[in-house]
Image (spheres, helix red, strand yellow):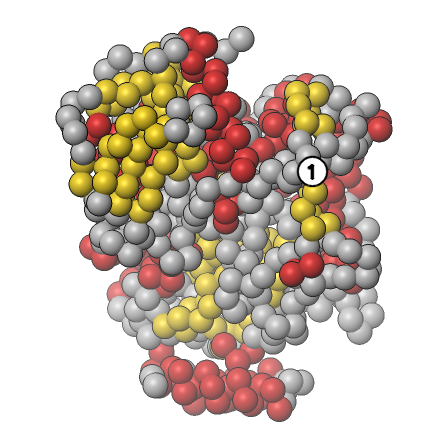
Amino acid sequence: MSFLDNKNRFLSKFNSRHSNANQLSWLMISSIFLFIGTRGGVAQVRTAPKTGFTLQLLHTSDQEAGVPALKDVPNFSAVLNALKNQDANRDGKPDYPNTLILSSGDAYIPSPFLFASDTVFGGQGRGDILILNALGFGAIAFGNHEFDLGTGLVADLIRPKEDYPGTKFPYLSTNLDFSTDKDLANLVTADGQEASKIPNKIVRNTIITLNGEKIAVVGATTPTLRTISSPGGVTVLPKEFNDRDAADIAALAAEIQTSVDTLLTKNPKINKVILLAHMQQIAIEQKLAGLLKGVDIIVAGGSNTLLADKTDRLRVGDKSAGTYPILKKAADGNPIAVVNTDGNYRYVGRLVVNFDANGVIIPFSIDSKISGAYATDSKGVAAVGAKPDPKVVAITEALKKVIIAQDGQIFGKTNVFLNGWRGDVRTQETNLGNLTAEANLAIAKRYDPKTVISIKNGGGIRDNIGIYTFPAGSTRSQDVIKLPPQANPVAGKKAKEISQLDITNALRFNNGLTLVTLNAGELLAVIEHSVAAIAPGATPGSFPQVAGLVFSFDPDLPAGKRVKSLAIKDGKGKIIDVVVKNAELVGDSNRVFRTVTLNFLATGGDGYPFAKRERVDLTRC
């Protein structure tokens, strides 16, 4: 057991016995155990304040507003504001006056929510930004979904217009170079400025001052951005990145460290640093934690990892994916906290932590009864005794009118719940995955009857078609009941009917279709790629949902050698061609199969190696 582990065990026991210990007590004890963790080196010179400092960090990521956000966003505002303004002793002052509100990215996503803003606010996604402004975010890191509709939309959302304020906060990323993109280059400003002075701007890092105490905030974005989104001319660093390669993780850490070091060198009195890291896998943020110096807190993003402790009440059906926060040892020997919550406005993350006089976090000061995940369902709102922000309610109600109109456009009917749950469509076959892949194949056959295969990525499915519910009086996750869509009398929709809104909410990207020709060897390479990222705890967006073929694979084998069998089947489910048997390619490797896929994948999205020959992009009717 390491010295730090022993320290944390001791401090944890002390805290459990002395939960009301005053600031002087924990500062004295922490100084005994943290003397080896002072930050040195030219780039980490720190001038210590005279006293410790308590920070309340309210955070989220992956807001990605879809239809459920019409309810969850107002609830989120109620919980967020209640925590921000908490006054337990009723002295007229907030319990935690030093409060930061931050997000680690994916603040919006192509969805009915985003598209409805075009009608209501004169531009796609503006409702999302207006909500973020009203909630009071101090800074947000770029995720991948910000770029899904290109950099032109990003610029439109950040930049103010006559009737639209743009972002009242800066957007951050230290490993993206925006100077190479024509839409975003002129939005970049100098790093290290106060966030409040640079709304509508893009920077690598910024400073937020809380009651005289300056806190550095640095952003970072997944280096896989180019393969999972559409960042235009933006330069992504490092240019080559494999999350399983320690050297690539180190190269990413070096990009971040340069930004941190430069900021601290220019501002030697700053000794508190928060990294907003949108890395898609919390395992990457944890690896970064051990490689960085001078960073105190990492707000993870992109993985929708719900970190919570035993004192947190979770939403029905949810389970904790790890303890809140995850505590690691940074490269400078100091403790570093990694935090995250589930996305889609379903939780507010809350970290209340003390810093010692050297700006080092004190792990034992984190009280599990205070810090953790706060659910934004109706029970969560009732628990904090607050009401939704009127500004947020007004925005969502305006969008709701446009969105509900789509719920009256009926396209089908289902007697069962259609599973589009993130953790399922990215790791296994589901009925919604099958249905959407089969639908793509049916459309493709109208254009080319020789089409026999449909391949799409599970990451393109963003929600279920149907609802979760529970028997009366039960809240146990094992009692969950999955039902088909419910009726909406206001829109004229009957129970079990599938509306345009159901479809556009589940398939938010509205991808086009592309026909390609694959020979047997290329087909095997595509399927190998689709399962290459499967690993314990991972939910890769590249995982496939297919039609016209069946295959098996072993995730314990090395990537690229996992497929055990693969066969083509006809519309009745009969095998018509065996391509792989006993992990070996069968027959002529040059025989070809007409295939339909998403145009996003056909152009290399999610890293898919589709052949470019005989490509036909299908037009939308």
Provide residue 180's location: percent of width, then percent of height. Answer: 31, 28
Residue 125 relative to residue 390: left or right: left
**Residue closer to the observer: 523 or 361:** 523
Q: Is residue 154 left or right of residue 78?
A: left
Q: Residue at coordinates 36% horizontally, 24% vertically from top-left?
A: 453
Can you say whether 98 is above or below 219 in the image?
Answer: below
- 154 sits left or right of 599 in the view: right
Instruction: Identify residue for label 1.
Output: 484
Q: What residue is drawn where x is 34% and y is 39%?
A: 551
Determine whether 402 is above or below 544 in the image. above
User: Does residue 284 appear in the picture of this structure?
Assistant: yes
Question: Which residue type carries mark 1?
Answer: Pro
Callout 1: few (<14), some (14-19), or many (20+) C-alpha neighbours within 10 Å? many
Which of the pair 373/538 is nearer the observer? 538
Locate residue 232: give its quadrant: top left
Q: Quadrant of the N terminus?
A: bottom left
